[in-house]
Image (tube, grey):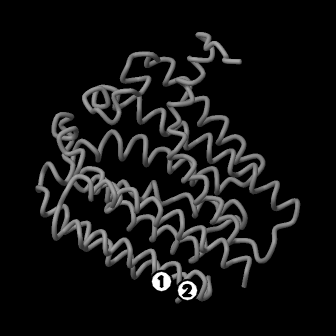
Amino acid sequence: MSTIATPQTNKAKQFYALMKPRVIQLIVFCALIGMVLAVPGLPNMIELKIMAIACFGIWLVSGAAAAMNMLVEKGIDAKMRRTSWRPTAQGELSDVQTGIFSALLCLIGCVILYIWINPLTMWLTLATFVGYAVIYTVILKPLTPQNIVIGGASGAMPPVLGWAAMTGDVGAEALILFLIIFLWTPPHFWALALYRVEDYRKSGLPMLPVTHGNEYTRLQILLYTFVLFAACLMPFAYGMSSWIYLAAAVILSIGFCWYGWRLFQNYSDELARKTFRFSLIHLSALFAALLVDHYVL
């Protein structure tokens, strides 16, 4: 029996879409990895409760940042095929509705983190919101082709937030995870920008393929995959993980470098798409390997 969509359910879907749910899934997953690695052995019931509450609070604030991003970029989104479907770009949600929704999510998430987790986690999460929704979206993205490099610091914060939620501080282990995501972000987004270059050109955003060309961007992707390879070995070198993670990190990093090399040698839009998709697999599988390694050995 099929269900009939009502105006209320459609509106709810539009608000949910503002939160970029697929992106936030990866953010919360990376935060959860930071939480798990901060706890020696299996977490007890109290720690599991803290993890669940922290994930919920981070999910809310991340959703608020995504909604604010859509509000600020609604005009740009409307020009790009990849984003023209968004509720703000379509005019399905007003600026006031989107702004209030973002503010409420941010407020509720911050209150949850402050009261039930700890103030440090709340302040770091709020700083991440400001970094993404304001510094990256409003200032860096329309100003410099290095926007994704500098702004990538916000996207690399989830493991740090997770670690802080469980320990009340920021350890070296959390900073290593931060570095991996920070270095992963440019080749991930530039692969997307390569095959979406006309969209970015029409939008007026100074993405690297627009300002410096296809070949230069491909070289940067390749160089970043090499540096990222080295960073992915750091958890093993620092003693955070064992051979299980090391094996996965080497295989995944060789794969990313291989895609980067192929892309540099012989470009095609299809290969850029495959590189972008593999980058998602790379990060997800890398952090999953850390999780398995933590509990198996």
Query: Residue 233: which disc?
Result: 1
Left or right of 211 on screen, residue 28: right
Residue 154 rendering spot, x and y as whole percentages: 45, 54
Residue at the far right in the pictured view: 45
How many other residues sit within 10 Å of disc 2, few (<14), some (14-19) or many (≥20)?
Answer: some
Left or right of 59 on screen, residue 184: left
Observer able to see residue 11: yes
Left or right of 294 on screen, residue 253: left
Q: Quadrant of the N terminus?
A: top right
Tag 1: amino acid: Leu
Observer able to see residue 190: no
Q: Which residue was labeled with disc 2?
A: 236
Asked if the residues shown at circle 1 and circle 2 are in contact, with their CB atoms under 8 angstroms apart, the answer is yes
What residue sits 20% from the left and 64% below the top? 218
Residue 128 rendering spot, x and y as whole percentages: 50, 50
Q: Against 5, is 172 above or below?
A: below
Tag 2: amino acid: Phe
**Considering depth in this image, is 110 or 274 the residue closer to the camera?**
274
Q: CA distance from mark 1 to mark 2?
A: 6 Å
Residue at the far top in the pictured view: 7
**Considering depth in this image, is 296 or 125 the residue closer to the camera?**
296
Residue 43 rendering spot, x and y as whole percentages: 82, 67
How many other residues sit within 10 Å of disc 1, few (<14), some (14-19) or many (≥20)?
Answer: some
SS for callout 2: helix
